[in-house]
Image: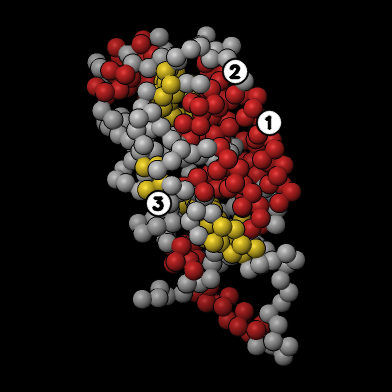
């Protein structure tokens, strides 16, 4: 059944109808270069005109859009794990935050969006905000990051990957969003900057066989990074051995006895500001590790070999480059790299 149209969208529809019914029958000129269609693994996404009312449903997507200079054309954001990047804070100030987590479908529609973007499959799906088809009912294009290509949602693991995520998927996301929003030059400049930073950070000389474990959240049944998501990019860039490289799930939940038995050289710890799971902050994680009878015996815990990353830096996004830089510097600080 077709959902009821919110009052704000109904009003907009009537205005558009009136324009279309004017004497010349012209609803107005379309911006030069439009319509624009991008095609990734999910589906074709077409912007029939230059988007002027964009809603981003995940922090990673939001920070790309802000980096492209689109703050004046954004009418809503949602689903945050951390504060926005400091260099984007001023641009983000005037944009309405629809929710800290998933907003309602109606809340998104009430902003009268002409483009919706998301970083995760679970956001644009049943049980998330809404499906791509739900938005299509109102002719609203919905774009999903290509970082989700080859990923299958499964249980509480944030999905399993059929292939390995590479940094190029993030560059593709930037270019596709730039194409849809008429910011191609800005997109290319952003990609070039990230590529330069990535090359510099990857030049670190890490000691042979340094093993690492990435803990995102939850103290009862911790989410640890599998092989092939954002932390996989970090590990491969720096030549680190992820102890759970055999796990194809993005963030499998692994019991503490197994974690302790792996005894990695370094623990990369998520420092989240959201309040969704237990042990979100780095301080809470370290307190748990050092007080738990099992984990307190781990070498990395005894020697306090911790590297802290924001939650957004552990998800595939432009912050993946930040993660490589921070882990590289952390390894130097710990005497494990030069």
Q: Which residue is mark 1?
A: 196
What residue appears at the point 51 percent right and 11 percent down from the top-left corner?
207
Within 10 angstroms of label 1, few (less than 14), some, or many (20 or more) residues? few
Q: Which residue is mark 2?
A: 204
Q: Is residue 269 left or right of residue 19?
A: left
Residue 243 in sight in this render: yes
Closer mark to the observer between disc 1 and disc 3: 1
Instruction: Give the total of numbered labels.
Output: 3
Q: Which residue is mark 3?
A: 122
* Secondary element at image label 3: loop
* Secondary element at image label 1: helix
* Secondary element at image label 2: loop
Quote the CA–CA distance across marks 3 and 2.
35 Å
What residue appears at the point 28 percent right and 30 percent down from the top-left corner?
254
Quadrant into which the C terminus falls? top right
What residue appears at the point 62 percent right and 79 percent down from the top-left corner?
16
Quote the CA–CA distance across marks 1 and 3.
32 Å
């Amino acid at each position: 059944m077709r959902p009821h149209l919110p009052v704000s969208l109904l009003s907009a529809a009537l205005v558009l109808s009136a324009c279309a019914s004017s004497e010349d029958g012209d609803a107005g000129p379309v911006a030069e270069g439009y319509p624009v269609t991008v095609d990734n693994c999910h589906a074709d996404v077409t912007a029939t005109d230059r988007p002027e009312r964009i809603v981003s449903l995940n922090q990673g997507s939001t920070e790309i859009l802000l980096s492209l200079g689109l703050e004046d054309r954004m009418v809503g954001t949602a689903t945050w794990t951390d504060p926005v990047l400091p260099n984007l804070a001023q641009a983000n100030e005037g944009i309405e935050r629809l929710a800290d987590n998933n907003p309602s479908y109606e809340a998104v529609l009430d902003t009268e969006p002409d483009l919706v973007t998301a970083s995760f499959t679970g956001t644009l799906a049943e049980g998330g905000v809404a499906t791509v088809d739900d938005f299509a009912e109102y002719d609203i294009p919905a774009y999903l990051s290509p970082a989700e290509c080859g990923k299958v949602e499964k249980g509480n693991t944030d999905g399993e990957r059929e292939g390995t995520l590479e940094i190029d998927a993030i560059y593709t996301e930037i270019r596709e969003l730039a194409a849809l929003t008429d910011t191609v030059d800005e997109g290319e400049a952003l990609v070039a900057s990230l590529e330069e930073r990535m090359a510099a950070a990857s030049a670190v000389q890490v000691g042979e066989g340094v093993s690492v474990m990435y803990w995102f959240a939850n103290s009862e049944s911790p989410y640890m990074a599998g092989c092939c998501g954002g932390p996989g990019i970090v590990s491969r860039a720096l030549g680190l051995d992820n102890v759970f490289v055999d796990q194809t799930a993005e963030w499998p939940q692994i019991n503490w006895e197994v974690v302790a038995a792996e005894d990695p050289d370094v623990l990369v710890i998520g420092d989240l500001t959201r309040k969704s799971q237990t042990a979100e902050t780095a301080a809470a994680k370290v307190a748990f590790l050092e007080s738990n009878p099992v984990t307190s015996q781990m070498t990395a815990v005894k020697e306090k070999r911790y590297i802290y990353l924001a939650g957004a830096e552990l998800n595939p996004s432009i912050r993946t480059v930040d993660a490589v830089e921070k882990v590289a510097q952390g390894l130097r600080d710990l005497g494990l790299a030069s």
